[in-house]
Amino acid sequence: MRVVIVVAVLCAAVACGEDLGPGDAQSSADEVSTREIGVLAPPEAADSAFTYDQEAAPAGAELQLEVLEGDGATTVRLSAELLQPDRGYAVHAHTDPCGRNGTDAGPHYQHEVDPAATPERPSVDPAYANPQNEIWLELTTDGQGNGLAETTVPFTFDDRVPASIVLHEQPTTATGHGRAGSAGARLACFTAPFR
């Protein structure tokens, strides 16, 4: 299993004394970036990347999570290699690390926590369970099982940060009252620091 963690504070080229080449982007001094790579393995052999359904999320598939915080917003990018070809996955950030069971990752991370939610009854209120208050990605794979999904949310993290991402069986996330945030069974989980 290969796990790589990179945490860096990005700064503007002038402040760092570096010249930007053509096409290079400038970043403000308050941006924080993280990147982690994990390879899915069955629960009994997994360290940080777990598969709970080896047909839909095969062992050996690689996930890479990148998170960029800055200017009051957070961009989350998930790339995948060797998942099940030609299918969609709804992906969410969750509050707890992955474990031997999909439920170990806890509920969805919410920037503003639904006061009516409990560990036994996660939030399904669209006022809280929505793609502006939670981190939702829709990952679609190509014929080789590779895909890329990205979202930007209008918040950054304080003392609470997500601990994992979960791939769900449905290709999209429900938004209706009483079902908001639902996306079916948990197929895979990746414990990945968001900061």
Image: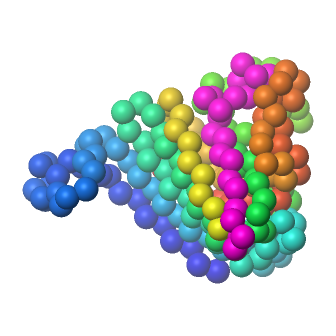
136 in magenta: yes
163 in magenta: no
**x, y percent for residue 11:** 24, 49
Identity of the residue drawn at 68% across and 53% down: 139
**x, y percent for residue 23:** 25, 56
As drawn, is 37 to the left or to the right of 139? left
- In which quadrant is the N terminus drawn? bottom right
**x, y percent for residue 131:** 65, 32
Between 95 and 177, the one lying in front of the other is 177
User: Is any part of residue 168 visible from this angle?
Assistant: yes
As drawn, is 36 to the left or to the right of 147? left
User: Is any part of residue 118 visible from this angle?
Assistant: no
Question: Over which residues does the magenta segment extend?
Answer: 125-145
**x, y percent for residue 155:** 50, 31
Q: How many badges with numbers are in the image? A: 0
Between 11 and 145, the one lying in front of the other is 145
Q: Quadrant of residue 190?
A: bottom right
Identity of the residue drawn at 88% across and 24% down: 178
Identity of the residue drawn at 56% across and 68% down: 37
Judged from this view, the residue extending furthest toward the front is 143
As drawn, is 172 to the left or to the right of 192? right
Identity of the residue drawn at 83% across and 59% down: 187
Is residue 9 shown above or below 174?
below
> Which is the main secondary structure of the residues drawn in magenta?
loop
